[in-house]
Amino acid sequence: MLKDYLVISQEVKEALENGKPVVALESTIISHGMPYPQNVETALKVEEIVRQNGAVPATIAIIGGKLKAGLTRDEIEYLGKKGREIVKVSRRDIPYIVAKGIDGATTVASTMIIASLAGIRVFATGGIGGVHRGAQETFDISADLQELANTNVAVVCAGAKSILDLGLTLEYLETFGVPVVGYKTEELPAFYTRKSGFKVDYRLDTPEEIAKMLKVKWELNLKGGAVIANPIPEEYEMDYDTINRAIEDALKEAEEKGIKGKESTPFLLSKVKDITGGKSLESNIQLVFNNAKLAAQIAKNL
Ligand code: PSU
Ligand code: MN
């Protein structure tokens, strides 16, 4: 029955059948996270980096109602060009989008779901969703966190942006048994910056050790994923105060405009980008490249 819904590209299928390493990649970052044409250029380059590091890339999206693991160049170009016209799809949106036979850009949560259905265990992206500031009032907690609690996929990211409440995000992950591992760091990175003021649970210094930890987790049937937090390379890091001022301004504007629900994250991301004059885009692109490389190295060791 799954084959009525899931379409795995030939290249990805062959890799999975032959036990070759595969890295999943998301598509909300393409349609909603970056402007055209940088989004398409980045998505294609990320695939190239995964290949250069010895793994097969599987960019994930919903196209014409099919859950796709492995996209063509044309499909990536299409998702990038259409941008925000493509529906942002998290777990709750999948049944509607598939039943209607339309397109969807997958978030961390829905990319994990499709990766897991396809048999892919490692996923690279920029940043995960989390507990929003003021969630005590708004209940705005990304579905990414529940997916990490339940679905066996490791997510390599540069931490999470401080548009979120990083302290509450860590508490939530702890409650649901999701390990947060820092790659060569004790501190949780905050996407644009290497520092956040919060600690990760554990530090591991090699892809081999990370793969070993994941293997143990899943062999023991400790269901759920893991956050592998990989700090942005120093040379692309942004100034801590500049980025935090931009985030404060974006949060204030979102509140004034009454932005809520699934619009909240894309609104804040694009505001921060506007306020920093697009400087944050280059950092964003570079940290995704850095994560793709680490994810490929982990996948090779799994
Ligand atoms: N954070 C980023 N960049 C992103 C996202 C989050 O720094 O592109 C996207 C991811 O696809 C993530 C989603 O899964 O936003 C979370 O949205 P929400 O908070 O509505 O769950
Ligand atoms: Mn939300």
Image: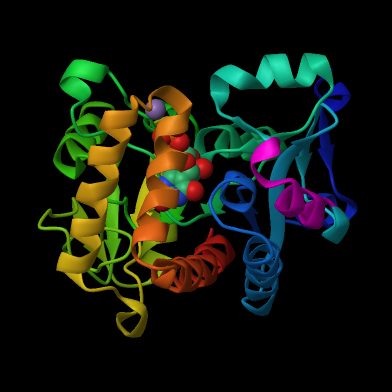
Q: Main secondary structure of the magenta part?
A: helix
Q: Which of 136 and 48 is in front in this view?
A: 136
- Name above or below for residue 148 compared with residue 288: above
Q: Give the range drawn in magenta.
A: 75-85
221 vs 196, nearest the viewer: 196
Q: Which residue is drawn at 75% across and 53% down?
A: 81
Q: In which quarter of the image is ligand 1?
A: top left
Q: Where is residue 91 in the image (x, y as percent from the top left)?
A: 56, 23
Quarter occupied by residue 110:
top right
Q: In this view, does 26 lie to the left or right of 163?
A: right
Q: In this view, does 151 lie above or below 230?
A: above
In the rendered structure, the answer to whether residue 53 lies left or right of residue 170 reads right
Name the quarter where the C terminus is drawn. bottom right
User: How far from the left and from the top, in percent, is residue 268?
Assistant: 37, 44
Q: Where is residue 12 in the image (x, y as percent from the top left)?
A: 79, 53
Residue at 71% x, 53% y is 80
Picture coordinates of residue 161, whole percent (x, y): 30, 51
Residue 236 in view (yes/no): yes
Compared across the picture, whether 176 is left or right of 267 comes to left
Is residue 286 on the magenta stretch? no
Q: Quadrant of the N terminus?
A: top right
- Residue projecting furthest to the left: 197
- Magenta-span inclusion, residue 81: yes
Q: In which quarter of the image is residue 18?
A: bottom right
- Residue 129 vertical position relative to residue 189 in the rendered view, above or below: above
Q: Which residue is drawn at 55% across and 28% down?
A: 90
Q: Is residue 215 visible?
A: no
